[in-house]
Amino acid sequence: MLNELDFDKTGGMIPAVVQDSGDGRVLMLGFMNREAFEKTVETGKVTFWSRSRNELWTKGGSSGHYLAVQRIEIDCDGDTLLIQAESLGPGVCHNGYRSCFYRRLEDGRWEVSEERTYDPKAVYQK
């Protein structure tokens, strides 16, 4: 299974698109190294490699808004994953939205295109 993933092509990490398994909405994009992929498969919770913190992070570890893996697909080149997951919380975006893709380009400006689903200040108390 791991030998079909081409981590070397992209510097040791591959992009993983996370899609809601219920309605197909794209929730987020993260990056996985081998360890993150193995942990995702082992635990059933989507886990990424944080490029800014240089460490593994399981989505929902701070917020409780985990992503439960339903299915994992690989692209034809073996360098990108599509993960269908059930969102176990009101949203995946640290800004309080269901999806990290909550803004759209309208008339040359980025406009918020949906309502917040939770208060990030109440979830991420730092």
Image (cartoon, rainbow, N blue to C red):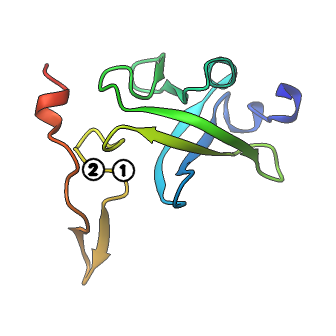
Q: Dot 2 surroundings within 10 Å: few (below 14), some, or many (20 or more)?
A: many
Q: Which mark is residue 100?
A: 1
Q: Is residue 7 above or below residue 20?
A: above
Residue 17 x/y as whole percent? 57, 48
Amino acid bearing label 2: Tyr
Which is nearer the eye, 40 or 16? 40
Mark closer to the observer (2, 1):
2
The residue sitting at the bottom extreme is 107
Residue 61 placement, left or right of 26: left
Residue 14 x/y as whole percent? 65, 37
Residue 77 placement, left or right of 48: right
Residue 74 placement, left or right of 55: right
Q: Is residue 99 above or below residue 81?
A: below
Q: Is residue 101 above or below residue 55?
A: below
Of helix, strand and loop, which one carries label 2?
A: loop
Q: What's the distance in space between the residues labelled 2 and 1, CA to CA? A: 7 Å
Residue 117 x/y as whole percent? 23, 49
- On the image, which quarter does residue 44 sit in? top right
* Residue displayed at 36% across by 32% down: 65
Which is nearer the eye, 14 or 58? 58
Of helix, strand and loop, which one carries label 1?
A: loop
* Residue displayed at 48% across by 59% down: 25
Query: Quadrant of the image for the N terminus?
Result: top right
Which is nearer the eye, 102 or 60? 60
CB-based contact (under 8 Å), mark 2 and mark 1: yes
Q: Is residue 120 above or below residue 97?
A: above
* Residue displayed at 31% across by 74% down: 105
Residue 64 x/y as whole percent? 34, 25
Count the labels in the image: 2
Label 2 belongs to which residue?
97
